[in-house]
Image (spheres, rainbow, N blue to C red):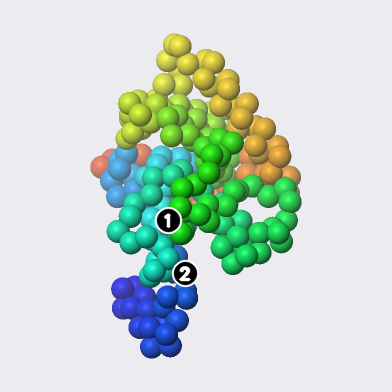
């Protein structure tokens, strides 16, 4: 991979296109390498998981003279923000269809401050599992009947203490689930509703150190 990326960068340099090319390097999912006793991503377990180690991704952006170098940005963003971002970056923001999720973060690509957002929340779906995540909290809702999860990401960034059934969090769960349901009712395509589609494949059904943990077929 390093060699292949190097070839692309060398070609851009040779053609004097490097400073006129925005390079984005990222993955489509995270990867547990023993985190939470798992090896794999969200479908390493059944029901699927939404641990940060499964859903957070690496993202490196480069354009010499335009994108700040050696800078780590901590804004909370999602894959669905990329389309409006790139459309604005190339001056075509007026051609972004109405009614799509996601908001442009194009100013960040130029080292500017991102303006105030209506809310800083990331939504995700994996099969019959949905997640709503803010900087402070994460709610994981599994359809139809759980198990569900609630994490305080400030106090428990490694998501080891599920607060869903703990006293004192009913209002927080109610509010976050309402926001979750409202968002998906607005944006989900009923034909592709993950909460109603069957799941197939193999995965991990137990901790990695337990016998028979891997290659478990959940559905035939």
| Residue depicted at x 42% and y 75% | 19
Count residues near mark 2 (Cα–Cα under 10 Å), then give few for <14, some for 14-19, many for 20+.
Answer: some
Query: Which tag is nearer the camera, tag 2 or tag 1?
Result: 1
> Closer to the camera, 214 or 165?
165
Tell me: residue 70, above or below residue 186.
below
Residue 152: % across, % down: 39, 26
How many marks the image carries: the answer is 2
Tell me: residue 120, above or below residue 152.
below
> Closer to the camera, 214 or 197?
197
| Residue depicted at x 41% and y 52% | 57
Residue at numbered disc 1: 111
Given the current orientation, which residue lies at the most extreme bottom position?
A: 14
Q: Quadrant of residue 65?
A: bottom left
> Closer to the camera, 83 or 168?
83
| Residue depicted at x 50% and y 54% | 107
Residue 163 seen by the camera:
yes
Q: Label 2's element?
A: loop
Name the N-terminal-most of marks 2 and 1: 2
**Looking at the figure, which quarter contains the N terminus?**
bottom left
Residue 162: % across, % down: 39, 25
| Residue depicted at x 58% and y 22% | 175
Tell me: residue 212, above or below residue 162.
below
Residue 131 seen by the camera:
no
Q: Is residue 173 left or right of residue 42?
A: right
Residue at numbered disc 2: 22
How far apart marks 2 and 1 lie (CA) works out to: 14 Å
Q: Is residue 60 left or right of residue 141?
A: left
Q: Quadrant of residue 71?
A: bottom left
Q: Label 1's element?
A: loop
């Amino acid at each position: 991979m390093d060699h292949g990326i190097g070839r692309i960068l060398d070609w851009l340099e040779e053609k004097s296109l490097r400073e006129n090319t925005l390079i984005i390097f990222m993955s489509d999912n995270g990867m547990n390498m023993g985190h939470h006793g798992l090896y794999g991503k969200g479908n390493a377990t059944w029901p699927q998981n939404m641990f940060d180690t499964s859903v957070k991704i690496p993202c490196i952006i480069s354009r010499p003279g335009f994108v700040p170098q050696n800078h780590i940005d901590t804004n909370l963003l999602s894959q669905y923000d990329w389309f409006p971002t790139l459309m604005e970056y190339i001056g075509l923001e007026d051609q972004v269809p109405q009614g799509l999720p996601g908001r442009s973060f194009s100013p960040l690509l130029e080292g500017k401050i991102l303006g105030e957002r209506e809310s800083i929340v990331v939504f995700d779906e994996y099969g019959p599992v949905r997640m709503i995540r803010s900087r402070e909290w994460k709610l994981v809702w599994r359809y139809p009947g759980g198990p569900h999860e609630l994490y305080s990401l400030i106090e428990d960034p490694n998501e080891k203490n599920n607060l869903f059934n703990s006293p004192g969090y009913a209002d927080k769960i109610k509010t976050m689930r309402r926001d979750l349901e409202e968002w998906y009712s607005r944006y989900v395509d009923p034909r592709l509703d993950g909460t109603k589609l069957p799941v197939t494949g193999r995965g991990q059904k137990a901790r990695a150190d337990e016998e028979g943990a891997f290659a478990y077929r959940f559905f035939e």
